Image (cartoon, rainbow, N blue to C red):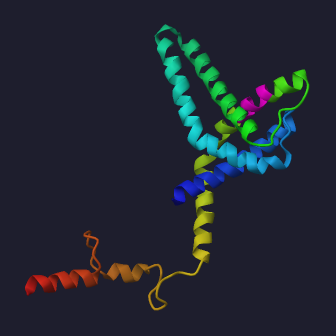
Amino acid sequence: MKKWIVRFVSLLVFNVLVLLLIGFLTPARVGWAALWAGFVLTVLVIWIKPLVTRWFRSIAARSAGNRTRAGEKLVELVLALAVALVIWIGTVVLTSVSVGGGLFGGFWGYVLPPVILLIGWAVYDVIDDRVEARAGALYDRAARGRPAATDASSPAIPRREASASRPVSHDGLTDEQRRMLDELGKG
């Protein structure tokens, strides 16, 4: 559960930044809708993007034998742009983000944001391990800040010297459970 929360939150923050960049560089108007649009975009990227990518790749695989290496790279680029366009359209439809007005504003409002999304996804792929590790550390620190539900006499985290003196067993039993089983075997 922690892994999904950390991944979702780190991707959400990154998507909000990318949406603000889209709003700054393109005719698309994002503004305060970036928060809700970031949430929707994150949901679409985590759960819908893999499905759409798989569907488009299955369609493109039918003619894979007829393409050259350069043709295959071009098809991969077109597929990535198509997936980004589907995700962008889903974000626009489900949020209050608008693509801009006019003949050319509307066109560029649908063309440029998927390109920026692709660049953003490439950047996130490069830094995602570090971002998720940092977010995981913050999550752990926040979780440690809550009061522990353990007995005050026993430490929540066993000390190294206490665990080093105990014999190591890999059966998953506590010392008390092991003693009780030994007594049952004797009787």
41 over 144 or under it: above or below: above
Residue 132 on the magenta segment? no
35 over 145 or under it: above or below: above
Looking at the picture, tell me which residue is in the foreground, 69 or 53: 53
Q: Is residue 81 left or right of residue 56?
A: right
Looking at the picture, tell me which residue is in the foreground, 53 or 94: 94
Where residue 158 appears, as percent x and y from the top left, is 43, 80
What secondary structure characterizes most of the magenta part?
Answer: helix
Residue 111 on the magenta segment? yes
Tell me the magenta residue range.
110-117
164 over 114 or under it: above or below: below
103 over 68 or under it: above or below: below
Quadrant of the snapshot with the C terminus: bottom left
- Which residue shows up at 62% across the image and 70% down it? 142
- Which residue shows up at 47% across the image and 84% down it? 150
Quarter of the view holding residue 159: bottom left
Looking at the picture, tell me which residue is in the foreground, 75 or 49: 49
Q: Evaluate whether residue 63 shows in this view.
A: yes
* Residue farthest to the left, as pictured: 187
Quarter of the view holding residue 146: bottom right
Where residue 79 appears, as percent x and y from the top left, is 61, 23
Where residue 25 appears, as percent x and y from the top left, is 85, 35
Where residue 164 appears, as percent x and y from the top left, is 35, 79
